[in-house]
Image (cartoon, rainbow, N blue to C red):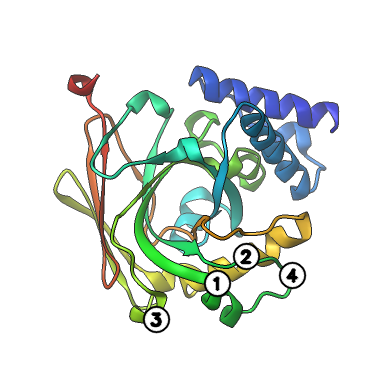
């Protein structure tokens, strides 16, 4: 690990710990390939695992054109999901867990079989899925004011923050995820709408992309792991006290509650 990679990983780990964002790091890596940003992210994951956390899955970020336009990037990325990122539906999530949270509705895949690329096909990916769940991903950035390009967000573990899963499993064969419409309500107000087709044409395509991207890095998508394929709408800022409901046709609904002052 180079000195610069260690410096960046330490800076981001400190931001997690203190809840104080840092300035963008990309300028220090102007000539570095994107693989260097993934090295920075993996160094943080290794630190968390060393401290007792456990990898429970992966996420695909920046998978829809809406999110890519919002974040000013032109390609997907991926991050790791650890046990500490998962929160129960309807249960208040401590607001001080995050720095500048936004929320995204997604269809979560839970795997029954391992997937490892390169060369994974849509057929193999579909066969590996045990069931789907409606999900809300809380994305967060350790970079001040979300001033991120692709290098910064990749280094920051794809801006991962938290995950809330619904509790009603649905078989992949029972829903056409390409056509599944989605509504996102915050405090009872309709904030955004979308559909599964916004996610690389289908959320299943995002699973294929992930398996084939992480495989050459020596990573296997494991049975029981959760994969978040990407948001069906734009990312929406949330604040303490907010209640968020995503309803995905054919998949179900999921509710996330960010604790307010009265919950402390």
Disc 2 and disc 1 in contact, CB within 8 angstroms:
yes
Residue furthest to the right:
2
Distance from Cα at disc 4 to Cα at disc 2? 13 Å
Residue at image mark 4: 118
Report the disc number at residue 79. Answer: none
Side of 255 relative to 111 (left or right): left
Disc 4 and disc 2 in contact, CB within 8 angstroms:
no
Distance from Cα at disc 2 to Cα at disc 1? 7 Å
Which of discs 4 and 1 lies nearer the camera? The answer is 1
Which of discs 4 and 3 lies nearer the camera? The answer is 3
Residue at image mark 2: 114
Secondary element at image label 2 = loop
Crowd rating for badge 2 (residues with CA inside 10 Å; few <14, some 14–19, many 20+): some
Which quadrant of the view contains residue 246? bottom left
Q: Position of residue 200 (x, y in %)?
A: 51, 70
- Tell me which label, 3 or 2, sits earlier in the chain: 2
Q: Position of residue 58 (x, y in %)?
A: 56, 52
Secondary element at image label 4 = loop
- Tell me which label, 3 or 1, sits earlier in the chain: 1
């Amino acid at each position: 690990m180079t000195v610069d990679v260690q410096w960046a990983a330490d800076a981001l780990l400190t931001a997690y710990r203190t809840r104080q964002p840092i300035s963008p790091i990309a300028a220090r890596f102007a000539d570095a390939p994107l693989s260097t940003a993934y090295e920075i992210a993996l160094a943080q994951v290794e630190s968390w695992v060393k401290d007792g956390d456990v990898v429970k899955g992966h996420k695909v970020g920046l998978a829809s054109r809406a999110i890519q336009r919002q974040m000013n990037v032109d390609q997907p990325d991926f991050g790791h999901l650890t046990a500490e990122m998962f929160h129960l539906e309807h249960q208040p999530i401590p607001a001080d867990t995050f720095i500048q949270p936004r929320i995204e509705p997604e269809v979560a895949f839970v795997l029954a079989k391992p997937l490892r690329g390169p060369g994974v096909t849509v057929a193999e990916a579909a066969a590996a899925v045990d069931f789907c769940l409606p999900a809300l991903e809380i994305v967060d950035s350790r970079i001040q004011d979300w001033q991120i390009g692709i290098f910064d967000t990749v280094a920051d573990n794809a801006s991962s923050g938290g995950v809330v899963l619904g509790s009603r499993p649905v078989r992949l064969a029972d829903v056409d995820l390409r056509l599944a419409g989605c509504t996102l309500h915050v405090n009872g107000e309709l904030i955004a709408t979308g559909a599964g087709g916004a996610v690389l044409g289908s959320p299943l395509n995002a699973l294929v992309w992930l398996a084939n991207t992480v495989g050459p890095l020596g990573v296997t998508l494991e049975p029981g792991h959760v994969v978040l394929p990407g948001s069906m709408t734009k990312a929406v800022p949330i604040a303490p006290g907010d209640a968020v409901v995503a309803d995905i046709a054919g998949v179900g609904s999921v509710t996330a509650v960010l604790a307010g002052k009265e919950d402390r």
